[in-house]
Amino acid sequence: KLTSVRSTLWTLGSLVALVVGVGMLAVVQTASQDYEKLPYTAPALFGLMVGQIAVIVLGVLTISSEYGTGLIRTTFTAAPDRLRVLTAKYLVFGTVALLTTTLSVGFVGLWAAILHSGPAAGPHGLAEWAGALAGCFYVTLLGLLAMAVGALVRHSAGAIAVMLGVVTMPPVLGSILMVWPVTSGVGGLVLRYNAPVGLFQLFGVQDNGVGGAAMPSDLAQMTLLVLVTAAAVTASYAVVRRRDV
């Protein structure tokens, strides 16, 4: 269904266009000395910050579009083992999302390394590429979380709205909570542990503390999203198994 439904192909195309387009625009606007403190994959991050919305939308549509059209009944009639169907969807979507984001980010990072590899760029190593790969996996987890929310909500617009709130609201909410001394501690946690900050940190761009506190480790950022995604996926299995459709 990923290849037969036109909307999914358009969504994947928009992901590639955003990551590569915005990333290459950043590459040509930077100089070699800019990469003295930045990884070569940094330009791709700017495109991925927008492109992650496409991953989220695709994750939701992978499951919720069938509920919207009623085709989910046909799917479960053809394959009565609902948990196997849901597992197949998670595996196929996760593989496609990870490969697409990794290839797009790698393309931009490779061109940045080719065009800005002079002495002014300073030394670079494999660690920054490993961080970019972790960032791509992070975005894939967001897509899997979106798919789980889609299975729970069974409504495309509602699930997308929930995921947009998950991605965009924590920085705003954290800033508001920092205004009052009583809630400043919670606000600091929200500002340090959220999807945009986690993605910037994995790419090696964000390393400054927030509210006087040091930033969490890359492993802590990744672990938090893994736990949240695992909880949502587990809930989706339980709900899909119990209800009629």
Image (cartoon, rainbow, N blue to C red):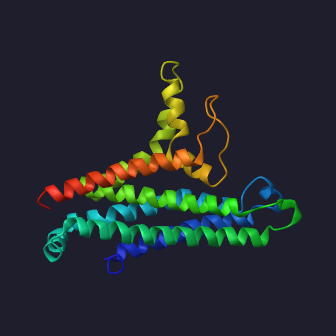
Q: Position of residue 146 (x, y in %)?
A: 37, 56
Up/down of 214 relative to 203, above or below: above
Q: Position of residue 145 (x, y in %)?
A: 38, 55
- Which residue sits at x=45%, y=68%? 97
- Which residue sits at x=45%, y=41%? 169
- Which residue sits at x=60%, y=44%? 217
Q: Position of residue 76 (x, y in %)?
A: 16, 70
Q: Is residue 44 left or right of residue 159?
A: right
Q: Nearer the viewer, residue 209 or 171?
A: 209
Residue 154 in view here:
no
Q: Is residue 48 left or right of residue 29?
A: left
Q: Position of residue 101 (x, y in %)?
A: 53, 67
Residue 99 in view here:
yes
Residue most toward the right? 119
Quadrant of the image occupied by residue 68: bottom left
Quadrant of the image occupied by residue 147: bottom left
